[in-house]
Amino acid sequence: MKTSYELETLKWAQEIEDYVIGIRRDLHRHPEIGLHEVRTIKVVTEELRKLGIDYEIVPDGGIIGFINGNQAGKTLILRADLDALPMKEEATNLKMKKVVVSNTDEAAHTCGHDAHTAMLLGAAKILSQHKDKVKGSVLLAFEQGEEMGGGIFNLLKRLCEIGADGVWGIHLKSDMPTGKISVEAGPRMAASFSFNVVIKGKSGHGSRPDLSVAPLDCFTDFYSNLKAMRLSSLDPYKTITYSIGTINSGTAINIIPESLQFSGTARYLDFEQGAHAANEFKRILEKVCELHHCTFEFITEPKECDLIVSNQKDCAQLAIAAVEGAVGVNALHSTPAWMASESFAFYEKYFPGVFAFVGIQNIEKGIGAEHHNVYFDIDEDALKLGVAATVQYTINFLDNENQIDFTPDKRDIKSLFVENGFAQLVRQ
């Protein structure tokens, strides 16, 4: 049987739906890229001030708001991201004119972070008005520069200093119908490694390739072997994707170039599979270059990373109950893991977490273009559902007295970043 607050959570979200949509549209009109979210931070802090919520600004990190409930208890982090992408969006979606468009050609919220921030402010508004339902404390974490990883180190460092017992986050999902929410346990988003390699040969005239060593020949052989690696070396039951994103070589049609540079990424849901792929990449590259009498140099060496976004099983059960209680059992949706990567994985190294996918696809409205796409748009009817689920999970998590099966990573934050290949994100 549902408790009274479970029956009220969606009603509370519906009552502030216009508020959430208004915040989202304002942020969408005025997007700012990572570590330049000056106006965005001003909007968020002004709303927190209006709500009577204390906050602190973490330089090059973001904002942390503080809500204390009716009695002492556990602490839950609610996280959203602030930044937009450095791209121009189209004024239409897949079918019709969008309800709101960026006012600048230099940036656009084509991933949904404007909605993430708006939903968190909506949840904050409800929780601050119903502190009698909050048994413990809530930390509102607004992260700068998620797309580039710019703010996560400083923000996470501060959150660890404060301390918490769990973390919740939301990401809109363009291929999930509006009305659906996925909070299932297990891997939700992929870890990744990148690579940037220079192959060096011997330049020469196009009329005498026999007197040269063409790095392009070496690369094409390597690329064929790389594609074959999936069949010959990798476990077919463990998902992994890898691709080449850039290739640069040559200056003229009749010159065999001295070198070729290529780069790309690999993404995976199993750490051992990722580590094996990184090692095989290096082994194949070394053997092929030797065969072609070329040498190679890593600008960025492929290095295994264990930053997989994964919903902790006990927290996922609390989240399933929260979605059922606040939105309804029909809202629960099962979806495969998303092979993109997310900085939420850093939080989950120190706090047991749930990363919820909230569907925004509405074919009739022309909404369904992929994230980071110029036609990306969101169905704003989904926002109140994200708010309701966030509020209900917060109440459920703070009320829960059962032990959560979780062991925090023993590494300090700097070591975590460095060992996973993100030394460039470490800020002093």
Image: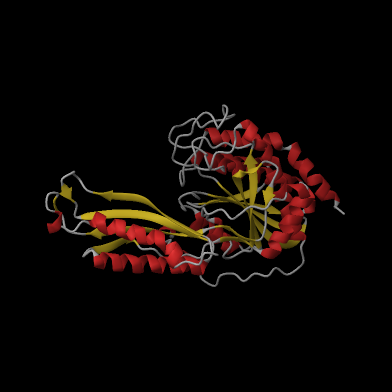
Residue at horizontal 16 percent and vertical 48 percent from the top: 255
Residue at horizontal 75 percent and vertical 38 percent from the top: 14
As displayed, is residue 243 above or below residue 85? below
Image position, residue 174 (x, y; %):
59, 43
Image position, residue 423 (x, y; %):
41, 62
Q: Is residue 59 left or right of residue 288?
A: right
Q: How is the image coloured?
A: secondary structure
Check the picture and name the quadrant holding the C terminus.
bottom left
Image position, residue 7 (x, y; %):
83, 47
Image position, residue 200 (x, y; %):
22, 59
As displayed, is residue 396 above or below residue 17? below
Foreground residue among 356 and 401: 356
Please identify the quarter of the rendering in which residue 212 is found: bottom left
> Is any atom of residue 278 visible in this view?
yes
> Is any atom of residue 52 visible in this view?
no
> Which residue is the extreme one toward the top?
97
As displayed, is residue 256 above or below residue 419? above
Check the picture and name the quadrant holding the N terminus.
bottom right
Q: Is residue 170 left or right of residue 343?
A: right
